[in-house]
Amino acid sequence: MGTLFLVATPIGNLEDITLRALRILGEASCIAAEDTRQTRKLLERYQIRVPLISYHEHNKRARLGDVLGRLARGDVARFHDVLGPTVPLSSGRQMKQLASVTECSTPEPWLPDKRTRH
């Protein structure tokens, strides 16, 4: 069973992403993104070549099986537009649902963006 990593989209500028976030995205077996068009821009800029699938509020029920299958085979990075210093309620519910169904670990509730210090 893989690990589900939550990665925040850089706010305003692609250069605001952390090195840690880039490492997680590059090492994941799959990236489940809320907005694949925006995520693709970032991945191309940093030459990250990892399978990208859409996973958002409107398709989560249809895609859950795909994400779970990928998670069973390796780590999945959940790239989310509204993650930041805290996980919003709707996002937190989605992550709890994934974690409870898969019994996966989520060691990092978020990857810090430029507004947080760790």
Image: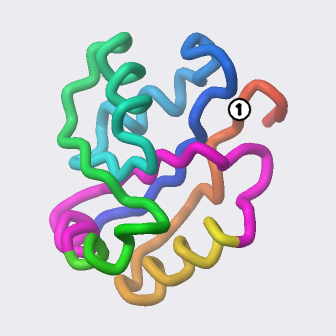
Is residue 1 visible to the viewer in this orientation of the structure?
A: no
Query: Please, what secondary structure does the residue beneath circle 1 have?
Result: loop
Specify the segment rendered in magenta: 66-89
Give percent across and percent down for residue 72. Answer: 21, 72
Picture quadrant where residue 76 is located:
bottom left
In-image side of 75 versus 70 (left or right):
right
Rendered residue at 46%/79% (across/down):
99
In-image side of 97 versus 66 (left or right):
right
Rendered-image quadrant of the C terminus:
top right
Whether 101 is drawn above or below 2: the answer is below
Pick the residue in front: 65 or 22: 65
Picture quadrant where residue 58 is located:
bottom left
Is 84 a magenta residue?
yes
In-image side of 71 versus 90 (left or right):
left
Whether 117 is drawn above or below 55: the answer is above
Give percent across and percent down for residue 104. Answer: 40, 76
Give percent across and percent down for residue 52. Answer: 24, 43
Pick the residue in front: 12 or 3: 12
Counting the numbered discs, the total is 1
Q: Which residue is mark 1?
A: 113
Rendered residue at 79%/46% (across/down):
85
Rendered residue at 53%/53% (across/down):
6
Pick the residue in front: 79 or 21: 79
Give percent across and percent down for residue 44. Answer: 30, 16
Picture quadrant where residue 8 is located:
top right
Name the amino acid type tagged 1.
Answer: Asp
Pick the residue in front: 36 or 98: 36
Whether 116 is drawn above or below 45: the answer is below
Whether 16 is drawn above or below 99: the answer is above
Is residue 86 visible to the viewer in this orientation of the structure?
A: yes
